[in-house]
Image (cartoon, rainbow, N blue to C red):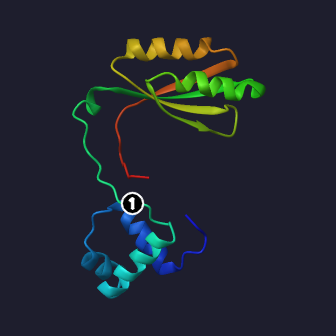
């Protein structure tokens, strides 16, 4: 988010992050300003490219039955591009982040079973340039917000 947001715009964006479907009248009440102010601010934020869209979050019926995990990966730094490309080919890996600390990458995985998760992690370890992995299974979501 650009650093040039004034306090009202920042509050508006924060409210939309929690619920992008809030009506303009409710946003105005929450922010303590007029509906027309919210409408003008929204149009200005869209025009500046701060807001690029509004989203609806759909529940996936199978989401609760899937195994979700985080796998931290230590790699040889000169092989990062190769490792990321190899990991990105795995359909079970939803996201890959660069991280600081002991590990270099964080991969977010989703599989049908713990056996499949185990096999995916084994394949990740076999990628040339991967030195070490550390994994943890996600048990339940306590808070989920759209990005």
From the top left corner, tell me how far across and down residue 31 is, in percent.
37, 80
Q: Name the foreground residue: 67 vs 36.
A: 36
- Mark 1 lies on residue: 53
From the top left corner, tell me how far across and down residue 109 is, in percent.
45, 28
Residue occupying image coordinates x 47% and y 72%: 47
Q: Among all residues in the image, which is located at the extreme right? A: 78
Q: Residues within 10 Å of mark 1 (few under 14, many from 20)?
A: few
Q: Name the foreground residue: 67 vs 140.
A: 67
**Quarter of the image containing the N terminus?**
bottom right
Residue occupying image coordinates x 27% and y 63%: 21
From the top left corner, tell me how far across and down residue 140 is, in percent.
34, 37
Residue occupying image coordinates x 65% and y 23%: 83
Q: Name the foreground residue: 18 vs 143.
A: 18
Please state if 110 lies on the left or on the right of 108 as rendered. left
From the top left corner, tell me how far across and down residue 19 is, in percent.
32, 61
Q: Among all residues in the image, which is located at the extreme left? A: 61
Measured along the vertical axis of the image, is residue 136 above or below residue 1? above
Measured along the vertical axis of the image, is residue 54 above or below residue 43? above
Measured along the vertical axis of the image, is residue 134 above or below residue 94? above
Q: Among all residues in the image, which is located at the extreme front? A: 47
Measured along the vertical axis of the image, is residue 38 above or below residue 61? below
Element assignment for label 1: loop
Please state if 101 lies on the left or on the right of 125 as rendered. right
Tell how many labels: 1
Residue occupying image coordinates x 54% and y 12%: 123
């Amino acid at each position: 988010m650009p650093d040039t947001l004034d306090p009202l715009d920042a509050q508006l964006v924060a409210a939309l992050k929690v619920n992008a479907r809030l009506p303009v009248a409710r946003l105005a009440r929450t922010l303590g300003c007029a509906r027309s102010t919210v409408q003008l601010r929204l149009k200005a934020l869209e025009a500046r490219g701060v807001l690029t869209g509004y989203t609806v979050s759909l529940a996936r019926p199978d989401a609760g039955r899937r195994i979700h995990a985080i796998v931290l990966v230590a790699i040889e730094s000169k092989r990062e591009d190769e490792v990321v490309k190899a990991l990105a080919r795995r359909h079970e890996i939803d996201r890959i982040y660069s991280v600081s600390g002991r590990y270099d990458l964080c991969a977010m995985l989703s599989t049908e079973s713990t056996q499949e998760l185990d096999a995916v992690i084994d394949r990740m370890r076999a990628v040339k340039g991967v030195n070490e992995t550390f994994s943890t299974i996600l048990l339940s979501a306590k808070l989920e917000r759209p990005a």
